[in-house]
Amino acid sequence: MARINSPAELEKFRKGILSKRDPHKPCIAVCTGTGCLALGAAKVVTAFKEEIKKKKLGTKVDVVDVRETGCPGFCERGPIVVIYPEETCYLQVQPGDAEEIVSQTVLAKKVIDRLLYVDPTTGEKIVRESEIPFYKNQMRHLIGNNIKIDPKSIEDYLAVGGYSALVKALGQMTPEQVVELVKDSNLRGRGGAGFPTGKKWEFTRNSPDQTRYVIVNADEGDPGAFMDRALLEGNPFSVLEGLTIGAYAIGSHEGYFYVRQEYPLAVENVTLAIKQAEECGFLGKNILGSGFDFTIRVHRGAGAFVCGEETSLLMSLEGKAGEPRARPPYPAVKGLWGKPTNINNVETWANIPLLINNGAGFLTSIGTEGSKGTKIFSLVGKVNNTGLVEVPMGITLGDIVYKVGGGIPGGKKFKAVQTGGPSGGCIPEKHLDIKVDFDELKKVGAIMGSGGMIVMDEDTCMVDVAKYFLNFLTGESCGKCSPCREGIRQMLKILTNISKGKGREGDIELLEDLSEATRDASLCALGGSAPNPVLSTIHYFRDEYEAHIKEKRCPAYVCKELISYHIDPDKCQACMICLRKCPAEAIAGDKNQIHIIDQEKCTKCGTCFEVCPSRFAAVRRISGEPVPPPIPEEARMIIRESKGKKK
Amino acid sequence: MSEILLQIDGTEVKAAEGMTILKAAQSAGIYIPTLCHHEKLEPYGACRICVVEVDARGRKGLVAACLYPVESDLVVRTRSEKVDKTRKILLEQLLAHAPDAPALKDLAQQYGADKDRFAKESSFCILCGLCVRYCAEVKKKNAVGFVDRGASREINFVPEIASEECWNCKECFPLCPTSYLQAAYHLTEALAFPRAALKPASGK
């Protein structure tokens, strides 16, 4: 690829790309993000390519494109295929569907009903991607391009207007003006803390040292969160462009991508994007003839959650163990190798090109008083539409769960949303109407974090949830400072005891004391926020803690030591289903003999409860009360009446 | 260096720019307890026993005195209900590991810490890192280091280095507040030192 030396050359090049592209030409876009790949998207792509070859569509006249794209977010229904220009969206596409899609939809312009999204409430089938409720209620400024471009092709990025922001920043704005614009937009860091981005840039820019660094924090470690992964895999150029603009504004000539090793596709796509950007002259010396030099290196993190904390990230980048160092001095003053350093999260950087292109008002027109723009969440857990969602700040939590997420599956009752990853908090039903932004989430004891959002239904035990997150944190705390290391250790011990029925009076108060010390005395934000899962579950679900401690009862029937399964002899029809399915062979019985669970052998897996036909509903969960004794042997026989005769 | 005026426990204290609160307090004869701090070593901020309450730029909170740089008009309280409560619980957590360590016992008495508040988990090491940092910063040998993270973190001698360097040094031994270090050394010596490197017991 030829180097582009000026804005004029870029526009010429862009025109060249666009002139070769017919917007009416059919294009089959297949998501090849990590989620869809896991569901077999690679085979779907191969099937499409073979089909096109077979039909000789690609050889004589180039009539259809197959594009391997990034993640559009509806991971639950992958592999996702969108056919352009009609924007027909097919879900859960299998390689076997390729032939039909090519002949019916691409060539004959007919819609294949069975691959469409069906609205679960109305039963209506929806053809266009943007009209599916999951997408309709989003505002997809950052991830919207994911399904439209091949993340391995800089031409695709240029075709959707890529690098026009860099041209504008370098050609028409001074670095100070860029910083002012970012300040005016009120953009706040998307990594979790929500610090004003423009201010951060200004601090770094104003540091007297001329050697400055800019860093993309892509060490996304929250369990179940994949916002940054999707951006890096699906549209790495937008992050690169944002970083380059930031470097120009801050006066930095060297940047780093700190990406976790566990994201191989993100590493691959980012590395390739950097290479292409270098070849095109969007990186390197004298970028677009502006005189500005900037290079980027990729650093793969070794998978420590704490390295998402900026000072630990810096330590790791310097080749040391990923442990935090004290602030102050802040990285803006003394960062990487002691030089002023500006670290922003992937999503923050991805916002920058949008800001430059559209002005500060673009962001300030969206959101709440204190939080502007959109935010990407990974919506997971007990919700119908799991996946990646980008919504305007200020949308209510209820709208995310019900309008975008499609509500709770299986007719279950909503219980809580956990936001902000392991250091976040659980928000109960009574706060479903809060506006989701940095400040409101904090008010209810949770945090925005980087955008994890786990929906929980009535079958979730809140003690178990707190235990899960503390268990995660006990292994992910770096262990340097004692309030974090020891506080989490002790809290986990207490929670484990409570879940095993060994909770004692005073445990809740002890948890609160430990939380306070860990929160207030820890060295970094990991410890500072680690007690959130404990504090928020105690705050909103204290009765559940008390049930575990005082009555040895788990109200959600989750904590195995506190529950039993029992077959109601009056309801059991001796159908043998549970007996056969029990993996522990703990159920005794026969065709005409009422089944009994051997409580000694039972592993409380719940299989019997799930498989017992609902018309019998004979298997019962018991917690906090003794299991009734097995009925006497002689009472176990069932005398059946069949065909009017008595057996 | 410009002089900075701050207030510690109601007393005006003069300090030089770049000094930590701990240094400033010490120079004014005000005592702040520490466990992981050592004159010859870089401030580390791990034990957090030196936490003090500060009012800085309108914000009130706990900071580690051994790390926090002095600022003009900073108001520091080395003892308060909050500080004492925090030190007490931190001590209790460490006492679960090393209930008989003299340094911990002394402080426990001062702060009313109950060594039995948490179930014993006698690792005997409180991970203050004095040995690790002394070996790295002063001796520049790195014969002892941290292994693993979070609740699994521990100190370990590196047999290959320790077998060469430690036998006639052992300067870290007296630094250890719990004497676990000596045990760890002898265990490594017995189990993991390369055979050829074993020195005679006399030391010659």
Image (cartoon, rainbow, N blue to C red):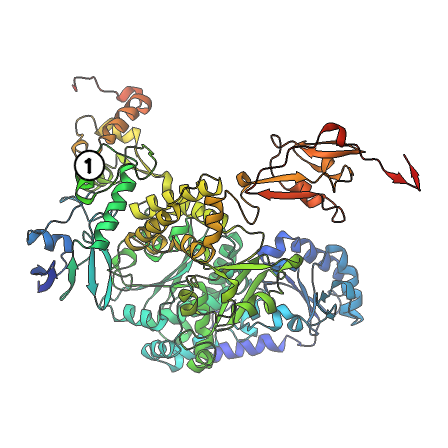
Circle 1 is placed at which residue position? B105
Q: Image height check: is A363 above or below B174?
A: below
Q: Secondary structure at mark 1?
A: helix
Q: Image height check: is A266 above or below A552?
A: below
Q: Chain of mark 1?
A: B
* Amino acid tagged 1: Lys
Instruction: Categorize mark 1 by other alpha carbons within 10 Å: few (<14), some (14-19), many (20+).
Output: some
Report the side of A112 relative to A67 (left or right).
Answer: right
Q: Quadrant of the C terminus of chain A?
A: top right
x and y percent of residue A214 in the render? 35, 64
Report the side of A175 relative to A43 (left or right).
Answer: left
Looking at the picture, tell me which residue is in the foreground, B79 or A2: B79
Q: Which residue is rendered at x = 55% and y = 68% of the image?
A: A398
Report the side of A422 relative to B133 (left or right).
Answer: right
x and y percent of residue A177 in the render? 34, 80
Residue A56 seen from this side: no
Question: How many numbered marks appear?
Answer: 1
Looking at the picture, tell me which residue is in the foreground, A354 or A114: A114
Q: Which residue is rendered at x = 20% and y = 49% of the image?
A: B50
Looking at the picture, tell me which residue is in the foreground, A165 or A259: A259
Q: Which residue is rendered at x = 28% and y = 69% of the image?
A: A203
Q: Which image quarter: residue A402?
A: bottom right
Residue A65 seen from this side: yes
x and y percent of residue A69 in the render? 60, 63
Q: Image height check: is A321 above or below B204?
A: below
x and y percent of residue B68 in the render? 20, 57
